[in-house]
Image (cartoon, rainbow, N blue to C red):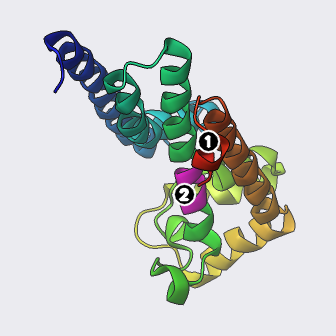
Amino acid sequence: MLTPEERISVYTFFSLQYQRVIEGQFLDFEFTKATIDTPEVTEQAYYEVIGRKTADLIAASTGVPGIIANVDQAEQRALFNFGYQLGIGYQLADDILSIWGNTEKTGKDAHGDIRERKKTIPIIRLYTESDQDTKKRITMLYKNKGQLSEIDIDYIRSKLDEGGFYERMCTELTNTLARTYGCIDQLSLQSEKKQI
């Protein structure tokens, strides 16, 4: 049973986290409305959106046990960061699967993020790193309404593949998961209980 003070701590924590998630959803709406060629569409802005929308939601579920268990601040922070990094990792994995995933294995639409003109990390990086002609074509494709043709999807996909974006995203996901596991290492659990 929680004491009144513990209940207040839990409610306060959840309220702040859910506020961040709601703010993240608003940021996502704004990010979705912005065109790819505007200064608002950056990796930093994308990470802010997924941090608020996805990572903070998962961090809420991993952070509250530390409050309930009344562990020290460092351990509470490690639990929170574990959930946050797990949320970032989830979103990066989703971005990878939504471009390069196998529909039969994932159930996701092949190239769904491209088809829907989502501005995910691979697309933002492709745009940022491209020459002016490629930027113009990507801008035109991402500003048009309606579904992209298979030719347009193949064009984007080929540019992503040429730039090694799949491998780069997999490396980024691996690094994020390493940070996630690093958070577990900070917990005062016995080694065998830290295994996931």
**Near-viewer residue (92 or 58):** 58
> As drawn, is 109 to the left or to the right of 70?
right
Q: Quadrant of residue 52?
A: top left
Q: Measuring from the top left, give residue 124's x and y in whole percent.
A: 66, 47
Residue at the spot 41% in from the left edge and 63% down from the top edge: 145
Residue that mark 1 sits on: 37
Image coords of residue 56 (percent x, y)? 42, 34
Give SS at disc 1.
loop
On screen, residue 125 above or below 183: below
Residue 171 horizontal side relative to residue 120, left or right:
right
Percent position of residue 155, x then y: 71, 74
Circle on res. 142: 2
Residue type at mark 1 is Asp
Q: Main secondary structure of the magenta part?
A: helix
Whether residue 91 is visible to the viewer of this picture, yes or no, is yes
Which mark, residue 115? none
Residue drawn at (45%, 39%) of the image: 31
* Quarter of the rendering occupied by the C terminus: bottom right
Task: Confirm whether residue 27 shows in the render.
Answer: no
Q: Residues within 10 Å of mark 1 (few under 14, many from 20)?
A: some
* Magenta-colored span: 89-94
First of labels 1, 2 by sequence position: 1
Q: Compute the Cα span from label 1 to label 2.
A: 9 Å
Tell whether 195 sits left or right of 115: right
